[in-house]
Image (cartoon, helix red, strand yellow):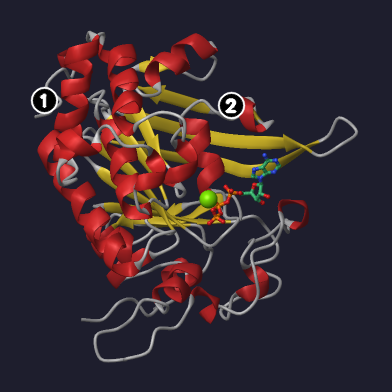
Amino acid sequence: MLDKNSMESSARKDSPLLQVQDLTVQFPAGRGKWLTAVDGVSFDLAAGESVGLVGESGSGKTVTSLALMGLTGRTGGRLAPGSKVVFDGQDLTAAPDRVWRDLRGGGMGMIFQQPIRSLNPAFTVGDQIAESVRRHLGLGRKAAMAKAVEMLELVQIPRAADRVKEYPHAFSGGMCQRVMIAMVMASNPRMLIADEPTTALDVTVQATILSLLRDLQEQTGVAMLFVSHDLAVVAELCQKVIVMYAGESAEEGTIDDVFFRPAHPYTSGLLASIPQPNSGTRRRLSAIPGGIPAAADWPSGCRFFDRCEYAKPGLCDAVHPSMTQVDGTSHARCVRASELTLAGVTI
Ligand SMILES: Nc1ncnc2c1ncn2[C@@H]1O[C@H](COP(=O)(O)OP(=O)(O)OP(=O)(O)O)[C@@H](O)[C@H]1O
Ligand SMILES: [Mg+2]
């Protein structure tokens, strides 16, 4: 069984496990220019907490996640000056790759949308989990393989002792995702970033993976950043949510505040795509007409202006809105937030 994250350093108990300040990620745009894909994202993740990161395709969720794993450079991007990532009291912003490598698969782990791509087809799943365990926990061969079996049991793979000897192609998509979760959780991470971990799976398999993640979180106390385009899924797993739009946070707060009393018209639009108990049909995210602007086309005012039914020309397109506190725990990037009463989820 995994340790409850008891290794938590007492000196750092009061500060959040992860602090992200003004995270700005840029990619080369030719002729020495850089284009901003993620723009000034700031949030905290406390030990044991689960935060959802939602938004339409292209809003910057994966770019944000990869930056938090120190992988921006590998995707050809860079962090702009002023960006800050502090994990467990350690400022990682300018940390050398060696430090990030130790943290990845150690203190922090990440699972992706396409688990099969993250597994090596040439090695058995047992070898792959054992290798991760040997590297990060320093166990010997035999103990590492025993840990691999234990981890497969933890993620509820039947006949774990046999299946540990099989290759990834023998596992279904859902089972592959379990293997990935097992591999990541084997090194007792304190933070798990799950980037659309169920999007590629059948609906029924999605539900089992989500409940597995919830159980693991309860058992281990791992903090989780759960990335999804699906607000309903986030509501099931997370205590807080950050709604991203065009590279920045549009609204954030506790699930209750954001879901029942959305303050940003974009959030309200996204919520309209969640199936309501008595409504039979499910509207898709495209319930909001139009699409997210590409980074090169971000307007200087509100980035949601073109799609917003409440937009006031001369006001909303005049200045880029900043995040301001609204009711309860919520903050929203909308100059009209305090005067609008927007539809949220109804029970
Ligand atoms: N390696 C890269 N080089 C250049 N631009 C990139 C790179 N990776 C991402 N981007 C740009 O950054 C923006 C945000 O992309 P990102 O992958 O984070 O979106 P997302 O919210 O994860 O979307 P999805 O729901 O489709 O996964 C997009 O406009 C994308 O084109
Ligand atoms: Mg993504």
SS at circle 2: loop
Circle number at residue 3: 1
29 on left or right of 23: right
Q: Position of residue 183 (x, y in %)?
A: 30, 31
Circle number at residue 260: none
Q: Is residue 217 visible?
A: no
Residue name at image x 45 percent, y 53 percent: 324
**Amino acid type at mark 1:** Asp
Residue name at image x 46 percent, y 30 percent: 122
From the Cβ of disc 1, is ligand 2 less than 8 Å away? Answer: no
224 on left or right of 320: left
Q: Is residue 73 above or below residue 153?
A: above
Quarter of the image where the N terminus is located: top left
Mark 1 Cα-neighbour bin, 10 Å: few <14, some 14–19, many ≥20: few
Comparing 159 with 345, the one in front is: 159
145 on left or right of 265: left
Comparing 19 with 71, the one in front is: 71
Pointer 2 residue: 82
Q: Position of residue 29 (x, y in %)?
A: 81, 39
Q: Is residue 254 above or below residue 316?
A: above
Q: Is residue 139 visible?
A: yes
Residue name at image x 14 percent, y 42 percent: 159
Which of the marked residues, 1 or 2, is nearer the chain's N terminus?
1
SS at circle 1: loop
- Tell whether label 2 touches label 1 (CB within 8 Å): no
Location of residue 106 by image quarter: top left
Quarter of the image where the C terminus is located: bottom left
Q: Position of residue 234 (x, y in %)?
A: 32, 59
